[in-house]
Amino acid sequence: ATVRWLMEQSIKVLFVTNNAGKSRLGLRDKLAALLDCEDLLQEEQMVGSAYSCARFLQQSLLGDIIDGTSSGEQKVVHVIGSDGLCREIEKAGFIVDNVPTDLSTSMSAEEVGNISDDEHMAVDAVVIGLDTAFNYRKLCMASYHLHRNPSCLFVATNEDAYDVVGLSRFQPGNGCIVKAVEHASQRKACNVGKPSQILVELVSKEHDFDPEKALMVGDRLDTDVMFGHVGRMNTCSVLTGCTTAKDLLDLKSSGNENELPTVVIPFIGLCMEDSGV
Amino acid sequence: ATVRWLMEQSIKVLFVTNNAGKSRLGLRDKLAALLDCEDLLQEEQMVGSAYSCARFLQQSLLGDIIDGTSSGEQKVVHVIGSDGLCREIEKAGFIVDNVPTDLSTSMSAEEVGNISDDEHMAVDAVVIGLDTAFNYRKLCMASYHLHRNPSCLFVATNEDAYDVVGLSRFQPGNGCIVKAVEHASQRKACNVGKPSQILVELVSKEHDFDPEKALMVGDRLDTDVMFGHVGRMNTCSVLTGCTTAKDLLDLKSSGNENELPTVVIPFIGLCMEDSGV
């Protein structure tokens, strides 16, 4: 309701997420239902990791053709990740190469030794999104492509270590897959999710806003608040997710005060209560 | 034949490998056949990562009971890795928990959220060895155990990035799996393989030798030669494996001359040719 009220006041609200599993439209539909904002929420307000990744690939491989129609040879992107991520990359004008030609999830040294260049397209980019069906064969193929083509782009939709799910369980995040492929290829991936400078620049370019008048609200210090800092925005921590009051106190006493948010509120609804609505 | 000749001269030869897939006896049998040394080679000359790991677990969890018979409660070790590694750890007196209770290789957020402490033993150590059937479910379970028990040991049999196999293909090594689990658990593993200090100490303790009179021979700079440096031994690079003459020249010109081996020979057989045998 707070978010609805903000939008009704013509305050510009953007939603920036490291979820690379959904297209912008998919994210919009999910959030509109959640926030009861079907009439107000636009696809353009959604900045997900899949969209950020597709735009970064366009800028890097196609010279920033915004409508995604490419002249000349089509570029090939090898994806570890969800169908939503693949579709967003295809929509941006790329051939996605992630069709499993072999259903086996393991790969022996002998099989790796016999990988043939003839059977596999040289790819222009390897993209890593969260894949809860990640396996050793996928690790082998991604690192094969990165070794084969030294100029191949290497993109991480985010570097998150884990998400907290269910009964205080930690679900390994996309960053774990990124670290595995980075070590195998001895290369560093470009992060296009929060808190990367690449994402700050994308948002600044596509949405006219003054960082000094913007407030980045989020429940994580390492991604949300850091993203606000990178973008020179004001930052607000809410305590309804990953970050706890103890985390904030620990950070303060550790001497890294520059990583603290500008303000802390227990939950975003408090904005509205304070405003008397 | 060179190795046979060295052993016939009563020169002490040890074989130190990051291969954690085989027991000492398994390594001995493989190497004895390869070197035609069935009559000379002893199991005790083999120092593999699986053995090193088992000894480290004994030192850390059982107070260094060398024969592996433990008094009191048995300790539980969760293993990602080969059967050879599991057997070596069992032989050292531990209960190995890596029986796949579920054949699925993927794991959804909902399943992670519903992991129940009641169904899973609390484990005393998580061990990572190369597993060419590594998958997301294994990543989830290893990081679950590390989050659940903050005093759980976390051991890497090695941190190798890759091996070169077949037609110049790069097979992702154990280090890739280690990096994934480290990121998910936000903890650092103890490396018990080359070039770790832990392995230097194990070899020094079990084999009476003077580092100044020892020569570490190997085909990799990052593991073999570095291991020699850590152990203050003389080092020798052979060019029959991973490291090329170009790697050595690159290292020299990079200014990291202290990482260079003491001597370089094209292949180990040259020792014997030089000696006139």
Image: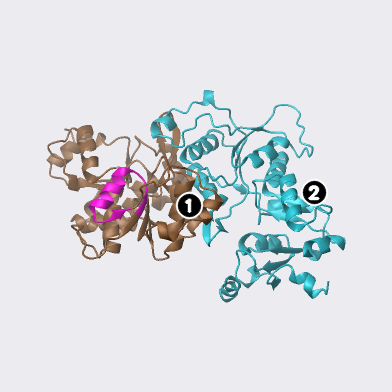
Chain colours: A cyan, B brown
Name the element at disc 1. Answer: helix
Left or right: B46 as drawn, with respect to A232: left
**Circle 2 sits in a helix, a strand or a loop, which is it?**
helix
The residue indicated by pointer 2 is A44
Question: In this rendering, would B14 be left or right of A144?
Answer: left
Confirm whether the magenta stretch covers residue B84.
Answer: yes
x and y percent of residue A45 in the render? 78, 52
The answer to whether residue B199 of the structure is visible from this angle is yes
Mark yes or no: residue B273 visible.
no
Q: In which quarter of the image is the C terminus of chain A?
A: bottom right
Disc 1 packing (10 Å; few <14; some 14–19; many ≥20): many
Q: Name the residue under label 1.
A: B140
Does residue B217 appear to the left or right of A12 in the view shown? left
Residue drawn 70% across the image and 69% down it: A267
Q: Quadrant of residue A34?
A: bottom right
Query: What residue is at 61 percent from the left and 73 percent from the top?
Result: A245
Quarter occupied by residue A111: top left
**Identity of the amino acid at label 1?**
Cys
Residue A24 pos. (x, y %): 73, 46
Camera-nearest label, 1 or 2 = 1
Q: Which amino acid does label 2 sit on?
A: Glu
**Residue that appears at 44% across and 32% down:** A112
Residues A264 and B251: in front is: A264
Point 19% across, 54% down: residue? B207
The range drawn in magenta is B78-96
Query: Could you tell me residue B33's position as x and y percent?
Result: 20, 33
Q: How far apart are marks 1 and 2 (CA)?
A: 35 Å
* Residue B241 badge: none
